[in-house]
Amino acid sequence: MTVFIALLRGINVGGHKQVRMGDLVELCRSLGFGAVRTHLQSGNVIFESLDENPAHLSLLIEEIIFEKLGFPVQVILRSSGELLRIVVDNPLVREGMSVDRLHVTFLSDLPPEAVRESMSGEAGPDRYVIVGREVYLFCPDGYGRTTFTTTFFEKTLGIAATTRNWKTVIALADMAGE
């Protein structure tokens, strides 16, 4: 069994796309996933699966949410091993950036190299570094004030994304390793 972390985009934010975490657990169990658990109310699900195809698993979760709850939700998956690598390899932590101002934007795919190379990585005090399918963000004035939002990366890179603060990333990695 492989442990996966499903990161759902845009649920339980601002009163839109309301999903009870208990319902989300039951939906995932109905797909045959084991050891299903959630973290916080913003769409973080850890589960085990014999199916090791993340694209297929994402699609299954997206389809059952649409079928049972009636709205589309983008689901981005990482294995527990990938999430551990994300934690260990954060270049902004290695540079000594304050961890309480760090975030990770998870991308659904590798960003196009030409687009990625044309991006600056800085605006005012905010900074980001793209490594593979992750964008490591440092927002000293808070994520609510940055121009480097999930929507910015989706529009600029042309792929789906979802963002979590560093504390949540660490918590998910810990839960996935249990």
Image: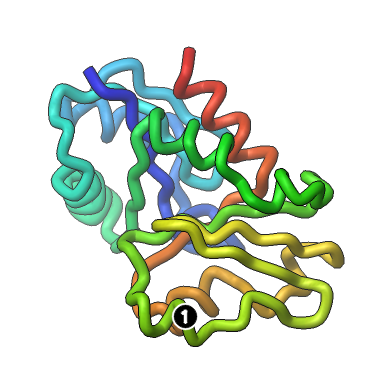
Residue closest to the eye, 36 or 49: 49
Residue closest to the eye, 96 or 67: 96
Q: Residue furthest top?
A: 178
Which residue is depicted at the point 26% across and 23% down?
Answer: 2
Q: Quadrant of residue 33 in the image?
A: top left
For mark 1, give the secondary structure: helix
Horizontally, residue 140 falls left or right of residue 68, namely right
For residue 47, above or below residue 152: above
Which residue is depicted at the point 16% across and 40% down?
Answer: 53
> Which color mode does the image show?
rainbow
Residue 139, x across and y down, in percent: 77, 64
Which residue is depicted at the point 48% across and 13% down?
Answer: 178
> How many tags in the picture?
1
User: Badge 1 is on which residue?
Assistant: 117
Q: Quadrant of residue 15 in the image?
A: bottom right
Image quadrant containing the N terminus:
top left
Horizontally, residue 50 falls left or right of residue 22, namely left
Residue 66, x across and y down, in percent: 23, 56
Q: Amino acid at mark 1?
A: Glu
Residue 119, x across and y down, in percent: 54, 83
Q: Residues within 10 Å of mark 1 (few under 14, many from 20)?
A: few
For residue 6, above or below residue 28: below
Q: In this view of the protein, can residue 160 be seen by the observer?
A: yes
Which residue is depicted at the point 53% across and 69% down?
Answer: 150
Q: In this view of the protein, can residue 23 be seen by the observer?
A: no
Horizontally, residue 6 falls left or right of residue 95, namely left
Q: Residue furthest bottom?
A: 118
Residue closest to the eye, 95 or 138: 95
Q: Quadrant of residue 14 in the image?
A: bottom right
